[in-house]
Image (cartoon, helix red, strand yellow):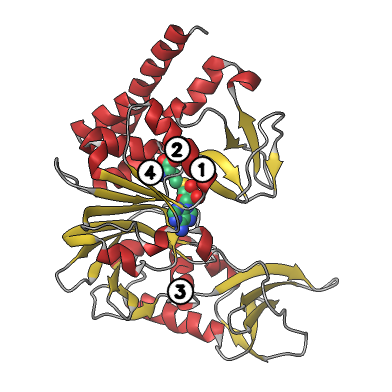
């Protein structure tokens, strides 16, 4: 494909993408639509991987112009899909890319519908400044540059190689925002707080620097997550006292966790067969995988993870472990019900049951009934109102 043909097809695909995002209700304002129609996403993803539909384990397949041809590559680049550009923090060898499985994505161009949904929720106006955490490919940074002007955009990326590629792509598209390479959990080193703060990586709590570097009445938009799952997208308003309060926005956005907050490699001590005390429980481990109850369980056990293991020819047990304090709960089928064997300083399943009871008393609402309050010394997720039942987020 010649350069002009490529530009023409890309132009058409951008408009198709914008049309699709409008049709689905994600893209609502003319300003953001103009940005999607204008920013060439393919410049930010010259080579990438996409998740394949193979049943079972997730496999990622490479998409490059050399492998699939210019047009197929362009079509993928403008699909409403997440495009993976790094795994396990390592550079991809593009000289002979192979399908990848058993790997953890660590950088990407986020799903466009999620990008625009977040940008719409940011409620920007002309003249505002924005800080973005998680530059990634630079595509969302470019959309903000197009909407607000590059001199009003700061973006922070922890991975120097990723940051360098994003900087080059932004430059190719004529945008020169302030790009910072470093740990965004420490802020962006702003002299003047920004009007808006947006994070495209998941965090276990809201970094204090993000509140400090956001203007009073300004908005922070970020995805909170734990080691079991994502809690969701939260929209906080900062006040004069440097506290921030707001609610989860409905939905289930899922972002890769900030690198510095990833779960430790080791799951910790796996309990022996005789450890702990056993009782029956009305709640089996399936609640951990169901969306709404899993949200409550994540709040109740902020440092926990779980896995299943079959004991010889015996039942499949679910191990819930908190490696930060060696607490455990082992769930085993028992006739039509379940038993739980717990040990360590925190009775994890008691915490889950207590939280579920509070949640059921409130009518078992979805995440949009929960909110978050961030003050200097504490971060709480509450149910209903800030004075309702609440759970502490880990201070990390
Ligand atoms: C989902 S990607 C960002 C997508 C990006 N906004 C785009 O449109 O291409 C998340 C990025 O956050 C970066 N990241 C992870 N931890 C970070 C941290 N502590 N500070 C800054 N960036 C971080 C990752 O390296 C990754 O590139």
Q: Would the CB of label 2 be found within 8 Å of ligand 1?
A: yes
Residue under label 1:
162
> In the figure, 378 relative to 370: above or below?
below
Closer to the eye: label 2 or 3: 2
| Residues at circles 2 and 1 in contact by the CB criterion of under 8 Å | yes
Closer to the eye: label 2 or 4: 2
Residue 396 tag number = 3
- Quarter of the figure with residue 218: bottom left
Q: CA distance from mark 2 to mark 4?
A: 19 Å
| Residues at circles 2 and 3 in contact by the CB criterion of under 8 Å | no
Residue 89, horizontal then vertical, whole percent: 60, 50
Q: Earlier in the sequence, mark 1 or mark 4?
A: 4
In the picture provided, is 53 more to the left or to the right than 205? right
Residue 166 tag number = 2
Q: CA distance from mark 4 to mark 3?
A: 27 Å
Residue 392 tag number = none
Q: Say few, some or many: other residues with alpha carbon within 10 Å of mark 1 (under 14 / 14 to 19 / 20 or more).
A: many
| Residues at circles 4 and 3 in contact by the CB criterion of under 8 Å | no
In terms of secondary structure, where does tag 1 sit?
helix
Nearer the observer, 282 or 20: 20
Q: Earlier in the sequence, mark 2 or mark 4?
A: 4
């Amino acid at each position: 494909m010649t350069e002009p043909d490529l530009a023409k097809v890309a132009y058409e695909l951008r408009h198709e993408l914008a049309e699709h995002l409008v049709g689905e209700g994600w893209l609502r304002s003319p300003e953001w639509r103009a940005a999607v129609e204008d920013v060439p996403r393919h410049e930010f993803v010259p080579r990438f991987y996409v998740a394949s539909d193979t049943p079972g384990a997730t496999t990622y397949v490479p998409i490059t112009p050399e492998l699939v041809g210019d047009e197929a590559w362009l079509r993928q680049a403008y699909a409403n899909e997440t495009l993976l550009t790094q795994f396990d923090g390592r550079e991809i060898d593009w000289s002979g890319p192979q399908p990848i499985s058993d790997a953890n994505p660590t950088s990407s161009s986020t799903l466009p519908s999620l990008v625009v949904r977040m940008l719409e929720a940011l409620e920007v106006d002309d003249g505002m400044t924005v800080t973005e955490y998680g530059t990634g490919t630079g595509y969302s940074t470019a959309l903000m540059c197009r909407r607000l002007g590059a001199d009003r955009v700061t973006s922070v990326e922890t991975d120097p190689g990723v940051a360098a590629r994003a900087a080059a792509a932004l430059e190719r598209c004529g945008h020169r925002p302030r790009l910072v390479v470093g740990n965004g959990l420490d802020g962006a080193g702003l002299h003047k707080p920004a009007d808006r703060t947006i994070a495209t990586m998941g965090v276990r709590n809201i970094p204090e620097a993000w509140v400090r570097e956001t203007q009073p009445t300004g908005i922070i938009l970020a995805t909170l997550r734990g080691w079991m799952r994502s809690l969701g997208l939260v929209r906080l308003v900062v006040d004069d006292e440097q506290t921030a309060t707001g609610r989860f926005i409905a939905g289930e956005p899922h972002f890769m966790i900030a690198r510095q907050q990833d779960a430790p490699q080791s799951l910790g001590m796996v309990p022996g067969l005789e450890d702990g005390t056993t009782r029956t429980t009305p709640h089996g481990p399936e609640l951990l995988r169901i969306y709404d109850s899993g949200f409550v369980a994540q709040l109740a056990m902020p440092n926990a993870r779980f896995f299943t293991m079959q004991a010889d020819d015996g039942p499949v047990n679910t191990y819930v472990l908190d490696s930060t304090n060696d607490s455990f709960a082992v769930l085993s089928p028992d006739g039509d019900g379940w038993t739980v064997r717990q040990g360590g300083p925190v009775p994890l399943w008691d915490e889950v049951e207590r939280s579920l009871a509070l949640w059921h008393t409130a009518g078992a609402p979805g995440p949009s009934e929960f909110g978050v309050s961030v003050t200097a010394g504490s971060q709480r997720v509450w149910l209903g109102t800030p004075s309702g039942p609440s759970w502490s987020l880990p201070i990390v």
